Amino acid sequence: MATVIAVIGVLPAMTLFLQSGSSIRQTQPYYQSLFLAELAVEEARLGSEEDPHYLDRLTPSDLSSGRWSVVRCEHPYLSALEDSATPFGRMEKGTDLSLEPRVGPLFDQAEPLGLTVSSTIDPARREATVRTSFDWIDQRGHSSAYSIATPILFWQSLSRVDVKGAGAGGGVAQVLAIGDAARLARGGLAGRLAALNGRPLPSGSHARAFRMLEISIEQERTTAELLGLLQALRPCVEALAAGGRNGAGMAPVDAIKDTLELFYKTMAETIYTCVAAANETGQPMSILLGAQRRLLRVAKMDSLTRGWALSTLSPYLAALEEHYRGRMPNVMHFFAVEAQDVATFPAKYTLKDAAQDVRAIRESFTMAALNCLL
């Protein structure tokens, strides 16, 4: 009798335990999807921040190529989860730990899940969204899914730099206005750099490198402003070159010369500062990457306006790609694309017309100067 009573007393607890176990098995894929979705969301956000070419990867041939198995490091988002193999400091697919049988129960829990990545890109509104979806068959044989949409950074390449102070109407008056605006821009840069250098360096081993990065940001900004002024200057210079003698004197000649010289001087200073920042010891990866990206951007413009072949940077880009391999895969992809693009440069460069404006001014300068002075 006592045994019967004991069994009857235990039955409700056993039933509750079995129901609880069944409930866990039913909801477990959902919770696994939540955790993995958080990882995928961070991968998408980080990718768009680190790699200006990230949107190019959201294609059927790369990140969005149908349904992927979550396990066995199939999708790039899940290719390596832990830095578990030498050389430490690099995470390589197929070498470092991923969702594979050796992780134990976690593999069994994640194996039923499938991953699909899709995207919506609206260039007109400069918006992009990545949708990450996980699907599975639950314990009852029903199809289930969890999906989350993530807005990501949209990098847009400019084809023109619009600036204030370029004047209007053409002719000598606009040339003089542009020259004044160029000198003002350079003076503004000098003031900002004086203010920066007047601040004491913060403590830390990377303080000097960070200050150099701040300086290069201001220098690049002024280089872009001067480029915008040169874009406005080209039709004026070509009109002076084609219009015959006008007796305008030295003032417009000085304005053209000063605008060109200030542009090249500021661009050269930007390159120098970026190289110095990248070679500082003890700087974090963010400072190093910022200097390398800025150096590449300015080098492209220098290449087109001076006429040297950007392909000479191929060894440098290949070295950067290898340096970031396994460390920062999004950055590695960025430099890999840049290394490929030097072969078709400047066809794919959005500022190629702006660079051509600078070269056209140089080509027309002598005749424009003669017409002003004679």
Image (spheres, helix red, strand yellow):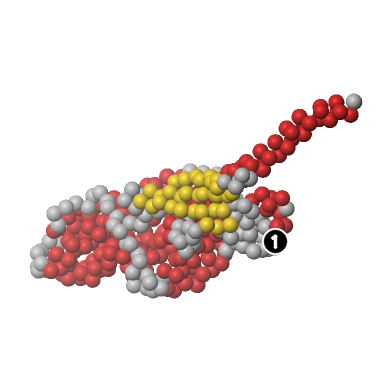
Q: Quadrant of residue 140?
A: top right
Q: Horizontal and vertical percent for residue 193?
A: 41, 49
Q: Amino acid at mark 1?
A: Ala
Q: Horizontal and vertical percent for residue 228?
A: 28, 56
Q: Is residue 125 visible?
A: yes
In the depicted structure, whether residue 301 falls above or below residue 151: below
Q: Horizontal and vertical percent for residue 106?
A: 69, 50
Local SS, label 1? loop
Residue identifier under label 1:
85
Q: Residues within 10 Å of mark 1 (few under 14, many from 20)?
A: few
Q: Nearer the viewer, residue 142 or 86?
A: 142
Q: Quadrant of residue 52?
A: bottom left
Q: Is residue 290 visible?
A: no
Task: Point out the image quarter for the N terminus.
Answer: top right
370 left or right, relative to 160 = left
Task: Point out the image quarter for the C terminus.
Answer: bottom left
Q: Residue at x 55, y 58 (%)?
A: 68
Q: Horizontal and vertical percent for residue 142?
A: 57, 46
In the depicted structure, whether residue 9 falls above or below residue 244: above
Q: Nearer the viewer, residue 186 or 51?
A: 51
